[in-house]
Image: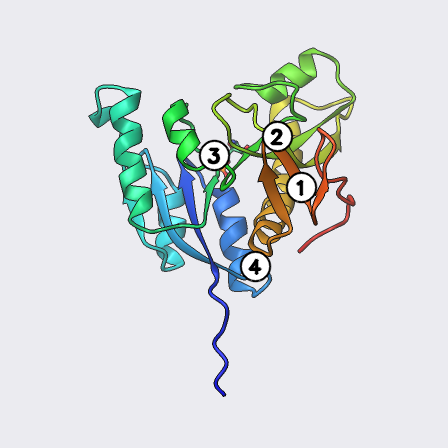
C-alpha cells in the first residue's frame, strides 16, 4: 500500500513593509522546523522590502495597492479575491498596516493571525513602544492574536514579555520586542498547522484547553 503525505497547511502572508517577521517564517520553514507551505506573499505597498525577501525564497508575490482603490470596501474585496486564488488555510498578517473591514475579517475568522508589538489589551494601534515608555511600564512585549473585526482586539494566542530597561528609548525597546516577535510568530503558526491552536466562539484553545486572556504561557526560552 502506498502512503500519501498529509497535505501541508497553506499559509499566505500579508505585509506592508520590511518583512522581518516574514523572514522569520521563511527561515523556520526552510530549516524544516515549520512544516507549512508558504503559498504567497501579498503586499498593499509596491515598495515593501518584504516582497524581495519572498522572491529570494521563491514564494509567489502579489501587490494589491490600496492607493488604487476608492475605499476600504473595494480594496478589501480585491484583497479577498487575491487571497482566495491561493486557497490558504491560514492568513498571517506580518506588519500589514491596513485596517480591515468587518466583512473581510469575518471571511477569515479563526484562520487569520496578527502580531502586535504590545502586551494586548494594552496599547492597541500605533506607537506602542513610545506609549509603554511614557507610561513608565517595567514590562512590555508582543502578542500574537486571532484577527476579529476589532482592530488589535481579537483573542490572544500567545505573548512574549520583555523588560523595559532604564536607558531604553523606543528604538532599543522595539529591537528587543522584534527579537521576540521572530521567536513566537513561527511557533504560533506551527501550532496552528499542527491543529493545536484554535479559535472557537471567540476563545482561543491550545490542545483543546481554553486559554487565559493573556494566551498560552510560553516559556521564555521556547523556540521551534
Ligand atoms: C512588527 O513590529 C509587527 O509587530 C508590527 O509591525 C512590525 C512589522 O515588522 N505589526 P516587519 O515588517 O515584520 O519587519
- The CA span between labels 2 and 3 is 18 Å
Give the numbered dot on residue 95.
Answer: 3
- The CA span between labels 4 and 2 is 23 Å
Which label sits in the foreground, 1 or 3?
A: 1
Q: In the rendered view, would you say 213 is above or below 43? A: above
From the viewer's perspective, tell me whether residue 222 is left or right of residue 130. Answer: right
First in sequence, mark 4 or 2: give its number: 4
Instruction: Work out whether residue 63 can be spotted.
Output: no
In the foreground, 169 or 203: 203
Q: Are marks 1 and 3 in contact (CB under 8 Å)?
A: no
Give the numbered dot on residue 205.
Answer: 1
Q: Quick one: SS at disc 1?
A: strand
Instruction: Tell me the residue that label 4 is attached to.
Output: 34
On the image, which quarter does residue 64 sit in? top left
From the viewer's perspective, tell me whether residue 209 is left or right of residue 29. Answer: right
First in sequence, mark 1 or 3: give its number: 3
Q: Quick one: SS at disc 4?
A: loop
Instruction: Tell me the residue that label 2 is attached to.
Output: 155
Which label sits in the foreground, 1 or 2?
A: 1
- The CA span between labels 3 and 4 is 20 Å
Q: Position of residue 38 (x, y in %)?
A: 43, 55
Q: In the rendered view, would you say 135 is above or below 185? A: above
Residue at the location (50% across, 88% down)? 1
Residue at the location (64% across, 37% down)? 204
Q: Are marks 1 and 4 in contact (CB under 8 Å)?
A: no
Which label sits in the foreground, 2 or 3?
A: 2
State whether label 1 is within 8 Å of ligand 1. no
Q: Are marks 2 and 3 in contact (CB under 8 Å)?
A: no
Instruction: Work out whether residue 224 can be spotted.
Output: yes
In the foreground, 72 or 21: 72
Amino acid at each position: 500500500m502506498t502512503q500519501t503525505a498529509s497535505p501541508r497547511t497553506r499559509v499566505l502572508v500579508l505585509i506592508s513593509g520590511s518583512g522581518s517577521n516574514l523572514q522569520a517564517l521563511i527561515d523556520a520553514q526552510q530549516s524544516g522546523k515549520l512544516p507549512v507551505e508558504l503559498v504567497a506573499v501579498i503586499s498593499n505597498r509596491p515598495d515593501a522590502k518584504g516582497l524581495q525577501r519572498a522572491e529570494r525564497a521563491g514564494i509567489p508575490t502579489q501587490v494589491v495597492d490600496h492607493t488604487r482603490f476608492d475605499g476600504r470596501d473595494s480594496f478589501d474585496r480585491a484583497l479577498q479575491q487575491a487571497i482566495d486564488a491561493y486557497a490558504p488555510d491560514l492568513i498571517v498578517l506580518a506588519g500589514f498596516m491596513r485596517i480591515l473591514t468587518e466583512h473581510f475579517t469575518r471571511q477569515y475568522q479563526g484562520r487569520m493571525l496578527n502580531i502586535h508589538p504590545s502586551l494586548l489589551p494594552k496599547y492597541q494601534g500605533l506607537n506602542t513602544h513610545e506609549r509603554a515608555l511614557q507610561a513608565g511600564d517595567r514590562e512590555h512585549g508582543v502578542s500574537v492574536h486571532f484577527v476579529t473585526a476589532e482592530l488589535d482586539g481579537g483573542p490572544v494566542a500567545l505573548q512574549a514579555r520583555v523588560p523595559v530597561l532604564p536607558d531604553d528609548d523606543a528604538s532599543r525597546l522595539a529591537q528587543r520586542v522584534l527579537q521576540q516577535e521572530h521567536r513566537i510568530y513561527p511557533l504560533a503558526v506551527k501550532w496552528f498547522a499542527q491543529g493545536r491552536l484554535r479559535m472557537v466562539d471567540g476563545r482561543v484553545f491550545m490542545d483543546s484547553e481554553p486559554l487565559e486572556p493573556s494566551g498560552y504561557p510560553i516559556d521564555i526560552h521556547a523556540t521551534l
